[in-house]
Amino acid sequence: MTSALAALAGLSAGASLIIAIGAQNAFVLRQGLRKDHVLAIVAVCALSDVVLILAGIAGIGAIIEQAPIALVIVRIAGGLFLIGYAILAAKRAIRPGALGATGGASISLPVAVSTALALTWLNPHVYLDTLLLLGSLAANYGADGRWWFGAGAAVASILWFSALGFGARYLGRLFAKPIAWRVLDAIIAIVMLTLAVLLLSELW
């Protein structure tokens, strides 16, 4: 039961961090609408997330074993960042904008893959989300549970990018409407704030 709960928590946390309007998701959606190199783009984004998530969990675990105080520092930093993330999501919900997913010329496979890599690995937030936030949240589930948490977060990434890329033909019209992102960002803001409270509450 503990393993299942840890995996479910990881799935929820991973989904909350991944499902947010941004350059990477807009690119995946745009290419999905065009049916243009979708498999390669989805694979790059999902596998990159899996690598970063596992690295974050492994790194945080090693630090905790040698310096328990590091967990306190990470929790404080992670909690503050989550609060900031929630505020930004709330602002997006209040002032929505349509996601332009169509238009423009088709691109080659090398360009598509390199763009997906750049949007993933050159985004500073991806390191905060995976190496810091998911890693610190996973640490709350113990030596074994944290890997189940990571597995849940990895599954969330794979499911999201697959749904966004291959289901874009159905999502395009919906997420081109400001109200759709408004509702989604409002939910994300609530989840982020809840995670921040849970993370910081572990300090007392």
Image: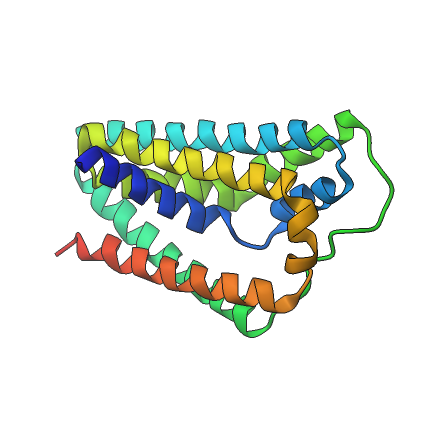
Residue 8: give x, y in percent of width and height: 31, 42
- Residue 67 visible somewhere in the drawing: no
Q: Residue at x 50, y 37 (%)?
A: 159
Answer above or below: position of 21 versus 182: above
- The foreground one among 148 and 112 is 148
Answer above or below: position of 154 versus 82: above
User: From the image, which quarter does the N terminus lie in?
Assistant: top left
Tell me how the rendering is colored.
rainbow
Give the residue at the far bottom of this rendering: 94
Answer above or below: position of 98 versus 40: below
- The foreground one among 128 and 50 is 50
Residue 170: give x, y in percent of width and height: 66, 49
Q: Residue at x 43, y 34 (%)?
A: 155
Q: Residue at x 47, y 66 (%)?
A: 186
Q: Residue at x 79, y 51 (%)?
A: 102
- The foreground one among 32 and 132 is 32
Residue 99 sits in quarter: bottom right
Residue 140: give x, y in percent of width and height: 21, 41
User: From the image, which quarter does the C terminus lie in?
Assistant: bottom left
